[in-house]
Amino acid sequence: MNQYDWIQKECAELEQADLLRHLRTLMSPPDNTITIDGRYVVNFGSNNYLGLSTHERVIATAASATCVFGTGASGSRLMSGNSYHYEALETNLAEIKGTESALVFSSGYATNISIIPVLAGEGDLILSDALNHASIIDGCRLSRATKEVYRHCDVEHLKELLSKSSDFRRRLIVTDGVFSMDGDIAPLQDIYEVATNFGAMLLVDDAHGFGVLGRGGSGTVAHCGLKGKNIIEMGTLSKAVGGLGGYVAGSRALIELLINRARGFIFTTGLPPGTVAAADKALKVMRSSSNLRKRLLEHAETVRNALTNIGYTLLPSQTQILPVILGEPQHATEVAEALLANDVYAPAIRPPAVPAGTSRLRVTVMATHTDTDIEHALDGFANVYSHKLQ
Ligand SMILES: Cc1ncc(COP(=O)(O)O)c(C=O)c1O
């Protein structure tokens, strides 16, 4: 026995419960088709929704910025790491979101765990949707505010909790715009109305709506007709934008306060200049590529209908994220492995990423999938269904 034996024991317990995760090795760019663990397969497991991480002009921008400015920022943004590329990117983000200002962080996760503790602290109340992303949950924990979880997308429950909240100093409602594991869209119009009536702040995490929904891909808030309203938006540059980084869009005063208080902004190195420049270029491509968005959502519709017709149980998503519910973790991993053997990569998602009993495949389509990719993948799904699920 030594003081580290518990580590192996915990891993064994996870394995026993079919909850042990393993890293898979990607040997190709994150495109419509990939080589993963030595297999060439259709990629139904990527957040590179528009294919921008391998877009020619985006790569060329990243390469030239890297050649001139080097591979790293070498300091935090408040010290020496604020390369001039940030200014263009943040101006671009604020314009897309229709806000006074925007601020870029090193990831979406870093954004949520940094901004929530600035927006709420001891004596405040955070109202959080039951299916919010882990980074929101962690941000709430770090804030030391009181947290109440409202039932998923249940505005009546939110109202009920708010009606008992007058003792708190400030109230913050926080919700995913598009839910990351379910693909449904938060009822933002109703939530905004409730927030306004109760004088509560509203923070929307648009990680999966940005680049996909709304005019020019401006996101879920715009999609719900709320662009320009008093809503704080955060999101990520790592999904439809195809790179890395997170952002907040809001008032000039908010951004000023975050620069001074958000610990995950202050105490970390800035992003590499090539990454910042690439995100700015990707946003420009994204805004002018309504054909990519259209194709993405058409693919989602095709795959949703086909999987349902084969016999799979899907949650009612309205976006490019298609959750195929399988139940127990072991079942989800078995089906994912069978799909891989049929040249389709669709990752199994198990607790704690999703509630117990709802392990699933998180199928995501990309605008860059060809019709042949989709046909091939659907053949794989049909084959696995007839052998494993019928
Ligand atoms: C809803 C949501 N918020 C935040 C994040 C974190 O973003 P990033 O991957 O850029 O850290 C994710 C990533 O999966 C997400 O799904």
Image (cartoon, rainbow, N blue to C red):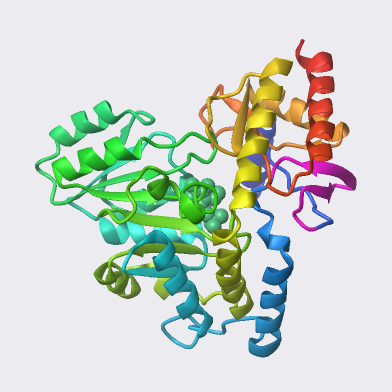
The reply to whether residue 168 is in sight is: yes
The answer to if 224 sits in the magenta stretch is no
Kindly identify the residue that appears in the image at 64 percent across and 51 percent down.
292
Quarter holding the C terminus? top right
44 vs 6, left or right, is right
190 vs 340, left or right, is left
144 vs 390, left or right, is left
Kindly identify the residue that appears in the image at 33 percent across and 45 percent down.
174
Query: Considering only vertical position in the picture, is 304 above or below 33?
Result: above
Return the residue found at the far left: 167
Q: Position of residue 377 (x, y in %)?
A: 80, 33
Query: Considering only vertical position in the picture, is 373 above or below 301?
Result: below
Depth check, front residue: 272 or 381: 381
**Number of numbered markers:** 0
The reply to whether residue 148 is in sight is: no
Q: Position of residue 363 (x, y in %)?
A: 67, 35
Q: Which residues are magenta?
A: 29-45
Kindly identify the residue that appears in the image at 51 percent across and 53 percent down.
217
Kindly identify the residue that appears in the image at 39 percent across and 62 percent down.
248
Q: Position of residue 93 (x, y in %)?
A: 45, 66
Depth check, front residue: 384 or 242: 242
Q: Position of residue 270 (x, y in %)?
A: 52, 77
The answer to if 42 sits in the magenta stretch is yes
Depth check, front residue: 362 or 298: 298
Return the residue found at the far top: 390
Query: Considering only vertical position in the picture, is 242 above or below 306?
Result: below
